[in-house]
Image (cartoon, grey):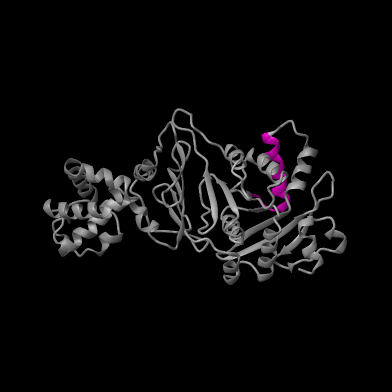
Amino acid sequence: MKRGGLWKRMGGAEVAAARDQSYEQILAAVRTELVDHQGHLLEAAHRDPGQRVRLREVTATVLIQLGLVQGKLPAQYLAYRLMADIVGYGPLEELLNDAEVTEVMVNGASEVYVERAGTLHLTDVRFTSDREVVEVISRIIGPLGKKIDLLTPFVDARLPDGSRVHAIIPPLSVRGPALTIRRFSQQHLTLHELTELGTITSDLAKFLREAMERRCNIIVTGGTGSGKTTTLAALLSCLTPQERIVAIEDTTEIDLSGHHLISLETRAANLEGKGEVTMRQLVRNALRMRPDRLVVGECRGGEAFDMLQAMNTGHDGSLSTLHANGPADALARLASMVMMADSKMPHGAVIDQIRSAVDLLVHQAREGSRRVVQRVCLVVKEAGERIQLVDAYTSGSGLLYPETSDRVRITPKLEGWWLSGG
């Protein structure tokens, strides 16, 4: 046997009939038996994970009948491993069943990393070959109506539980197939819970809650894995259940139980290149759905133009996220994306649009496994060639009260709060 896990727990005496068989031989024999006599159940298990329990029981019986394993208990152990390779996620099955794993990264057959508590760890999980990695990828995306091959060598998908999947294979991935699975968090934290965890301070939570109540337009920025979506969901949790939220995302992550939430998700083109639904199309549709709050999960392109138009035409209190190294970089990226959507718009007009629309930027970066460094900036509303920012909070200094001369230049939505001393 080439694999560990459950197989390692089987004693030598219990598997006397299997000791002369390689795992691959047992796998081939069981797969043939299932295809020949349990095709309907096998197909059902591919589509519905709930059918795997029944299929595992049948597989354990097949192992005993074929004389591959002696004893009911070892048959059940081996059947679990076989199910992972036949209809499950192969060597990744146990990792994906671990609630502490937030991300799984496969770099070819010989390297599998996981993220736990914000820290990457190299595991001892291995695939037998790059071909096996591709087979697992195909089993993951097959039930979603997608495929990966030389004509379509990369794929983005969402699992039924909301987890995001990205895969890319050779020749595009030079060192072997690469697979990344970002787990979907079923629990979204509130600002109060983030305060209790020590992720944000109570002063910052109070300020952000006030900004949401005063309908500031907010953009959350940061790098990959910095917790932008977590912060976005925490901000939305401040809203009353009566407010109608329309959220547009590439892959649905925001799930606010008890809130009036409409979730829209983009769609990739089919194999014929038809049927694509873009983020920009969904933003335009969302504006016709009477949103009290418009949420663009992540601005990446021309949808930034439509989002700014919405913020400037009565849809106050809208939110989005953006990949950036800092608040100033975020505004520069936002300007570039707007010009991608409308190249005829003068740069000065784009700057005016952003200055008028955006009230607040929340930037964060992760340091270590749990610490999140934050900086919150207010957008100065005075005209000029460049957009000026005023710090409202930094992790090192805490909440900052702008000088009296700055208060009249920042967003009027927060002016009364500043003047009252917060």
| Farthest residue, direction right | 405
Q: Quadrant of residue 47?
A: top left
Q: Position of residue 337 (x, y in %)?
A: 67, 40
Q: Position of residue 218 (x, y in %)?
A: 68, 53
- Which one is nearer the viewer's eye here, 351 or 75? 351
- Which one is nearer the viewer's eye here, 268 or 366? 268
Examine the rendered structure and indicate whether residue 26 appears above or below residue 346: below
Examine the rendered structure and indicate whether residue 170 appears above or below residue 103: above
The stretch in magenta equals 323-341
Q: Is residue 76 found left or right of 376 in the rendered image?
A: left
- Which one is nearer the viewer's eye here, 330 or 262? 262
Examine the rendered structure and indicate whether residue 237 appears above or below residue 166: below
Q: Count the marks.
A: 0
| Farthest residue, direction front | 242
Residue at (40% x, 61% y) in the render: 98
Q: Position of residue 417 (x, y in %)?
A: 77, 64
- In this view of the protein, can residue 321 be seen by the observer? no
Residue at (54% x, 57% y) in the render: 259
- Which one is nearer the viewer's eye here, 369 or 246? 246
Quadrant location of the C terminus in the rendered image: bottom right
